[in-house]
Every structure is written in C-alpha cells, then in structure tokens.
Amino acid sequence: MAVQVLGGFEVRRGLRRLNLRPSARRLIALLAIEGAMARGDAAVRLFEDQRVERAYANLRTIMWRLRDDADGLVVEEADGLRVNANFVDFQAALRWSLSMVQREAQPEVPPPFIGRQLLPGWSEPWLIAPRENLNLLQLHALDATAERLMMVGRFGEAVANALLAVNMDALRERSNRLLIEVLIREGNVADGLRNYETYQRLLADEVNAKPGIAIQTLVAPLLAAGYVVPPRSRIGRR
C-alpha cells in the first residue's frame, strides 16, 4: 500500500488506485502526515468545530465505512490508529531531507517528490504547521546537498538541487547564491550572470532590496572584467 499526499492525494494498493470517500481521505491524510495517533486525538483534529461526542461518532462512521471501501488500510491498535502503508511520500521526504541536512547519506539528486506541495487545495488547519516545516526542511536539505555536490565537482547534480530550491522559494538568498556559484564554478558564466540579474530584479520588485554581499562578491570580479549579462530569461524561471 502506498499513500501520496505531496502534489495531491492518492492511495494505491499495488497498481490499483483506491477510490475513497472525502471523510476517509482526510483521516488517511492526517495519519500519513502525523503518524500513529490516539483515536480521540484524531477525532478532535478532524472535527475540531464539533462537540467531542459528535467528533467520536463521526470517526466511528469513517472507520466502519473504511472496512468496506479499503479493509486493512487503517489499523486499530488498542486506542490508536495508524495507516497500514509500506510507503508514504511525506514521511519519505522528511527522511531524505533530514539525511541530507545531517549529512547521514551521500549527496544526490533529490527524489521526484521533493519540492511538491503538501495537499494543495486543502484548507484544513492541521496542515499549516506540517506544510511550513516540510518546506523549510526541504530547502535546507537542497541547499546543503547542492553545496556538498559543488565542492566535489558534481556540478550538474549541484545545479539540480539549487535550482529546485530556487523554484520553491525564488527570494531565498542562500539558494540563489549557490545556484549562481555553481554555474560560475563550472565555467557557465553567462547563466550565472543571467541568474544574478534576474534575482537582483526580483528582489527590487518584490521587497525593494538588493542581493547580499556574498552574492555581489561572486559576480563583482566578472562585472569588473567587463562581462555583460546575455539577453535571455533565467533558467527554470516561469
């Protein structure tokens, strides 16, 4: 069983996609993101605008219907509930990001689910904190990985990490600096200067600011030597 909550919701049993009711989808998503939970905690989180007795009753209804729609997807253990899945993309994204930040694994190109938004279009209050935490952790992981790859001369992979971070947060100083530095170090001066110009313009338009000293220091020798920015839009920028 695989549960996807990044970029959208989906549950698959083998090659078959399970068609779940909206209430069941909310429960599965909650457990996939938070992990195993006490039954009462899950009821309150899902139905926080209702009285406790009503919330418990609603959860019992969801569990009863799940036994018909997807038996075994949610496991009941004593007073707790957990998703019975061998893969949850949200948890995999957390593990990958932590392993990169803590340097527990070799740096690599990020998995395909990194950078995807957590349940886009969903407005549940319990998604606010996980969305922010995942986004920040992924950005730190991508920056750290790009820097490690750059230092060992794996420039193509370093660009992939840095560019994904920039596309996630176009105003992020560290990610833009890393992208520009990698491009310059690999001898791709034109793309490095184009990215610098675009970032400079974006900062001025969005927050009336200038790039930091670290970025200016990267490009200053090139500009002083007479290099000019080629007239082409930034790579990866929509």
Image: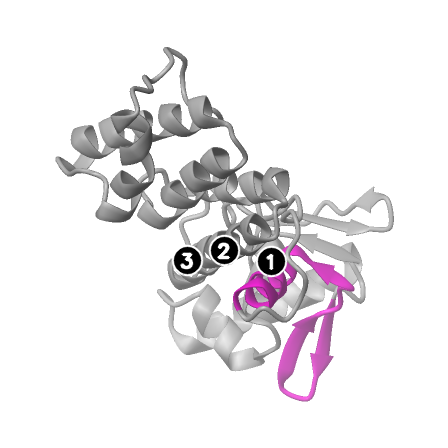
- Taking depth in this image into account, of 92 and 153 the one nearest to the observer is 153
Percent from the top left, x then y, of residue 72?
Answer: 80, 67
Q: CA distance from mark 3 to mark 1?
A: 12 Å
Q: Residue furthest top?
A: 231
Q: Earlier in the sequence, mark 2 or mark 1?
A: 1
Q: Residue at x 53, y 45 (%)?
A: 115
Quadrant where the C terminus sits is: top left
Q: Residue 32: which quarter of the image? A: bottom right
Q: Residue at x 12, y 35 (%)?
A: 208
Q: Residue furthest bottom?
A: 78
- Taking depth in this image into account, of 208 and 150 the one nearest to the observer is 150
Q: Which mark is residue 205?
A: none
Coloured how? one colour
Residue 98: in magenta span: yes
Residue holding disc 2: 138
Residue 233: in magenta span: no
For disc 1, the neighbor class at 10 Å (few under 14, some 14 to 19, many from 20) is many
Three-letter code, disc 1: Ala
Residue holding disc 1: 93
Percent from the top left, x then y, of residue 108?
Answer: 66, 52
Three-letter code, disc 2: Gln
Look at the image and give the residue range highlighted in magenta.
Answer: 74-101
Q: CA distance from mark 2 to mark 1?
A: 8 Å
Residue holding disc 3: 136
Three-letter code, disc 3: Leu
For disc 2, the neighbor class at 10 Å (few under 14, some 14 to 19, many from 20) is many
- Taking depth in this image into account, of 126 and 89 the one nearest to the observer is 89
The answer to whether the residue labelled 2 contacts the one labelled 1, judged by CB atoms less than 8 Å apart, is: yes
Of badges 2 and 1, nearer the viewer stands 2
The answer to whether the residue labelled 3 contacts the one labelled 2, judged by CB atoms less than 8 Å apart, is: yes
